[in-house]
Amino acid sequence: MARRPLPRILSSGSASITRSREIARTAADSATDVLHPLITIVRGLRLLAVSGRQKWVATPKERRGPKLFLAAACLLAVALVPYGPILALITVMGAAAWKGRERTPVKTGPDEAESTRLRALYEALVPYFSVADDPEPLFAHGGDWEKAFSGYAFDGDGRLTRLQVSYPAYFTDGEAAARARIEQLLHTKSGRGREYHFAWDEEANRLVMTVLGPLSTSVAAQRFVTAPGETVLGFTDPDAVRRTVPVRDGDTTVDAAPVVWRTGNRSTEPHLLAVGQPGSGTTTLIRSVALQALQQGDVLVVDGSGTGEYGALVGRTGVLAVESGLGGALATLEWAAHETERRLIFANRARQGGHPLPEDIKRPLWILLDRPGVLGHLAAADGRPDPQELLQVPLRHGRAAGVTVVLADQFDALETLGETVRTHTRARVVLGPASPEQITAVLGAEPNITPPAEVPAGRGYARLGTGPVLRLQVPATPDPYDEDASESHRQAVLDVLPERPGDERPDDAPAAVDAHDDRDTTEVPVAVEAVPTGQLAKAKAAIAEG
């Protein structure tokens, strides 16, 4: 049977049909553009009618009569006023145009990509938040993630910035290992390279994950607004503490949230221990503490590393000694132990006699020891006592005697720290990259923040006594003689340093001249020892003879 050919209109008219469709679509678009004002007004009239009808239905029956009478009176008044109907028509058209205008649609939920990400998070949490015999599981494969995630927020790149998770009551949220698994999973699925804060509400069975922003690294050394006995260790998140202080951040002044460490005879954390990796900023922290302590007290510095990081403090007012050698360090610490005992004796006599404390006892004494593990190794090789043994008296009785001890060392030297140091240094700081296990071992509490792999110098965590673990950024306090450091930060340290007794600036000399002289100092001794006097000199002589 021969095939019948297709009609001409079907075989050769496809191009004409396509052109006709394009012409019709263009005509429709043009008509829409021309009639757009009319369409807007009609849409507005419809919305006004719907709104009027809803208000009329919501009006009680006993009030409908007065409303009708008021409307009729208004219409009569409009009709009697010259040009009233025209003005009324223009008003109605304007209201309809405003009501019917096209508005930007308000986003009421996640888009497709965000829904996909939330769905993936929900499915990943199912094995941890579900059991086989749960009759109505909140988490189940293929379940409704909207019931489990009651709140969420995304940034401009489509990554999660906040997530509120509701979990079943039978989840073991009281176990640290169970919480750590959930935090690690959310951290991995939400994106690495950021810091996440996890707030567990065990009573409401709710977990809130929040992405933390970076802390400012441009705050340099300066005179902070603090009370006597308060030391600013660094700055943290604004919602983590209840206090702010004005600080200079570059060329502007901002309110920052400080981590304030309180010392003195009423302090519950009278001594500080800082631990970190090489280059993490522990020396910067000690230098920052020294600059603040010199405002109202005396300072003894023992540099166990012997790198000359504290050379700028030599001979300054209030700096009793800066030691780098083993012999000088032992003599200085022995004098500090005797000074602590002397302060205790005189303070006890004054209290028993009902007299005020002597001025030399009320002035705080700070013992700053950097890298005691190195000195302990040298002392063991030379057959001398460990310097940490000389710290027992200042650590045990320093609070009552006005003596504060600050130690800084690295993670590999933690095992060399004595029991007295571990017991009495209740203020703890961890700087630099560290694992959650290392942070917990130093601070004594598990951080509820995921530590990132890379952090700037001076960045870490702090815990004062039994308080919470706080993020910390130490103020930029470099060695003012370090040419590799920022010039502005070096100058900030020079501005805070006290004057040397023999280098007082004359009244008619400008401040810039003195600062220029300090910056031009190029030769800095590595093993620095200030010239001691009194009992400190006698202690050094005894050590040398022995």
Image (spheres, rainbow, N blue to C red):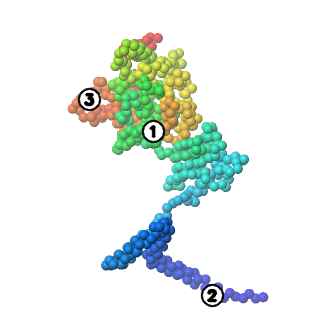
Label 2, residues with CA under 10 Å away: few <14, some 14-19, many ≥20: few
Q: Earlier in the sequence, mark 2 or mark 1?
A: 2
Q: Is residue 426 left or right of residue 533?
A: right
Residue at image mark 2: 9
Q: Residue at x 44, y 26 (%)?
A: 267
The residue pinned by badge 3 equals 505
- Which of the pair 398/518 is nearer the observer? 398
Return the residue nearer the eye: 387 or 450.
450
Q: Which x, y percent locates residue 11?
A: 64, 85
Q: In the rendered image, which quarter is residue 82 located in?
A: bottom left
Q: Secondary structure at mark 1?
A: loop
Q: Nearer the viewer, residue 218 or 239?
A: 239
Dot 3 falls on a residue whose secondary structure is: loop
Which one is closest to the eye, mark 1 or mark 3? Answer: 1
For image coordinates 55% across by 40% down, the residue present is: 448
User: Tag 3: residue type?
Assistant: Arg
The residue labelled by disc 1 is 241
CA–CA distance between discs 2 and 1? 81 Å
| Amino acid type shown at disc 1 | Val
Nearest to N terminus: mark 1 or mark 3: 1
Q: Are marks 3 and 2 in contact (CB under 8 Å)?
A: no
Q: Residue furthest left?
A: 508
Amino acid type shown at disc 2:
Ile
Depicted 507 relative to depicted 162: above or below: above
Q: What is the quadrant of residue 231 in the picture?
A: top left
The residue at the point 48 percent across, 31 percent down is 464
Distance CA(mark 3)–CA(mark 2): 105 Å
Report x, y in % for residue 198: 55, 43
Residue 400: x percent and y percent?
A: 43, 20
Query: Which of the marked residues, 3 or 2, is nearer the chain's N terminus?
Result: 2
Query: Residue at image x 53%, y 15%?
Result: 383
